[in-house]
Structures are given as structure tokens and as C-alpha cells.
Amino acid sequence: MADTPTHTDTRVPTVIADGVHVIYKVHGAGARRGGATAALSRIFCRRTAPGMSEVHAVKGVSFTAYEGEAIGLIGSNGSGKSTLLRAIAGLQPVARGRIFSHGQPSLLGVNAALMNDLTGERNVILGGLAMGMTRQQIHERYDGIVDFSGINDKGDFISLPMRTYSSGMGARLRFSIAAAKDHDVLMIDEALATGDAAFQRRSQARIAELRERAGTVFLVSHSLHTVRETCDRAIWLDSGVLRMDGPAPEVCAAYEDSGRAAA
């Protein structure tokens, strides 16, 4: 009798989180930071400063993301979603566990390091350079970035300082800059919730393009509708713990059921 062939997973991993814990310290009310001598003493003695507390934001999270996936991160406020993205991007140190990534993950709003006192036009250039585009590439894609963002739909806002923009306008411009470049791993934190229906459709179409080019997209959103429409997979975090990982419709339904049960 012939041996039954075993299935081999041919998908290419882009991000591997292996038992990741993220712990950070926060100052409590009335905490005194002290001088340099006190700080050095705490470092060498490994003591937490008076008035400070530790937040165990991510607790033993493990998963593997693959080329072509769009993964929604869902959970209540304070569940560790944004902290996990920052850890994947290398912006938040990991206390225990390891994170492996293919290429350099791009966290929307950080890689596009926009400055409020500069015009939108100058920020398009700055954000493009921060993501590794050449000036020639930025010049070639500039009109597309502005059109995609819709910044100029109601006036010449691209020539005004970003401090004059609403939070939604700023978020749309950040997404538009990030979307102008293909990414191995693109992480988006709530950016799609700030635009109108037309902008959301454009954003979802761009995410589909990135996936077709073997990119991986992580999307943090409180809108389960957006996750269902945009993502094929979802990860549910609950107080830093990975509660469920699977097809987006199933995970979103379980999350909704838990909310109804708690009500």
C-alpha cells in the first residue's frame, strides 16, 4: 500500500511572531522622574522608578503571515493591536519572544513622517523619501498621490501647511503616500476609517493590488465592516492575548457574539 502523500504548504511567510511579549513602563499621576543620578541608579539596580507602572500590552502572541494576505487586527481599545504593529515595525522593543520579517515592514503614519508646518506638497516629497523612493519616482507619482488623497477636491489644500488639515485629510494623505509604493509588509492603523465611501473604495482597491504583487497588509480597525470588506483573515486580540486567528468573517462574527454576550 502506497504511503499517503503529505500536504506541503508552499506559501511564503512574510512575518513570523513567535511567543511575543511587549511590556512598557508608564508614568503614574504625580510621578517624579528625578535626576540623572537617580536614573542611573535605577538602571543598574533594575528598579522601576517611583510612580511608574508596567503595562503588559502583548502576551505571548504567535502567528505567521504570508505573501498576498490582508490581515485585520480587531479588539477593544487597549487590547494591544497598535502595540503589536509597532513591535513588528521594529519601533517597540520585545520583552520576550521573537519577530521575523521579510524586508522592512512599513507602518503607515510613521514611515510617512509628515510635518505640520510644511505644506502638503513638501510633505509628499518628505514622506516619499522616508519610504525609500527617489526624487524622480516621487515626481512621477506626485499627481497620482494628490488625486488619490482627494486633498484638492475642495480647494488647493496641497499648497497649505498640514496644520490646516483636518485629521481625516492628514490620514488620507499619509495613506496616499504609502500607497504610491509597493511594500513587502504594509501596516495601516485606522487610516481607512477617515475617508468617505469613494476614498475607502480606492483604498480597498489599492490594498488588493498590493496583495496581488505578493505584499502583506495588516489593518487595525474598529470597523468590522471594513475588515470583512478588505481582509481575508483576522486576528482578535483581547487584553494582549491572541483570542482567535482565522477567516475574517468567522473571527468578526465571534467578536460580535462576545460583545453581545457581555452586554
Image (spheres, helix red, strand yellow):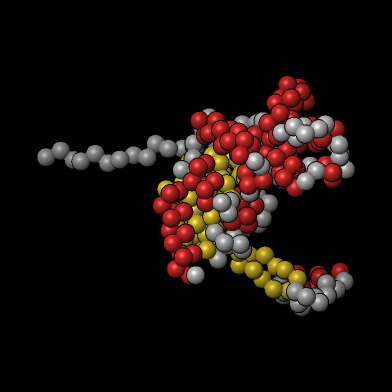
For this view, does 179 lie left or right of residue 229? right
Q: How many marks?
A: 0
Residue 261 left/right relative to 93: left
Question: The N terminus lies in which quarter of the figure?
Answer: top left
Q: Residue at x 41, y 52 (%)?
A: 250
> How far from the left and from the top, in percent, is residue 135?
78, 25
With respect to residue 25, does 173 lie above or below? above
Q: 222 and 233: which one is in front?
A: 222
**Is residue 45 at least partly visible in the picture?**
no
Q: Of all residues shown, which one is farthest toward the front?
A: 154
Q: How far across and down, in percent of the image, does residue 157 sit?
A: 82, 35
Front one among 200 and 110: 200
218 lies left or right of 136 = left
Q: Give whichever of 154, 185 is nearer the camera.
A: 154
Question: Which picture quadrant has residue 148?
Answer: top right
Above or below, 212 relative to 185 = above
Residue at x 75%, y 26% (from the top left corner): 142
